[in-house]
Amino acid sequence: MRKHMIAGASLALAVVTGCADMSSGEQRTLSGAAIGTAAGYALGAVTGMSKGTGMALGAAAGAASGFIYDKYKQNEGQ
């Protein structure tokens, strides 16, 4: 139990400090990939598809969506 808590705290610290130097585009792409991974896992569990396949497809779709959204936001200001 204690090992899991230490690992979780270390991961949270790495995520928080690792994202500090990222551009908005990188942050949006990473956020999209993370949300897509979670959604893909859930979809894979519900549909009976492999959870790993669902996660991979979700991560790819989420990263692409985050990247496209960032380009849209950049062009919106022009």
Image (tube, grey):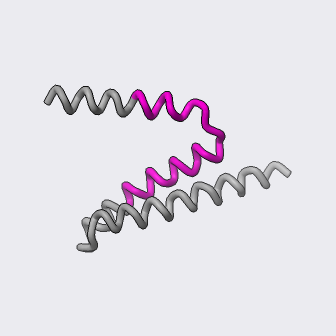
Instruction: Give residue 76's position: percent from left, percent from top.
Output: 78, 53
Quadrant of the image containing the N terminus: top left
**Residue in the picture at 28% in, 64% down:** 51
> Vertically, is 19 above or below 30?
above
Q: Tell me, yes or no, whether the highlighted magenta stretch contains residue 36.
A: yes
Image coordinates of residue 66 in percent, x first then y, are 58, 55
In the image, the segment drawn in magenta is 13-39
Asked if residue 52 lies left or right of residue 23, the reply is left
Q: In this view, does 61 lie above or below 31?
A: below
Q: Which quadrant holds residue 47?
A: bottom left
Q: Position of residue 13 (x, y in %)?
A: 41, 27
Residue projecting furthest to the left: 1
Residue at 61 percent across and 37 percent down: it is 22
Q: Where is residue 67 in the image (x, y as percent from the top left)?
A: 62, 56
Magenta residues, dominant SS class: helix
x 32%, y 60%: residue: 41
Q: How many labels does the image show?
A: 0
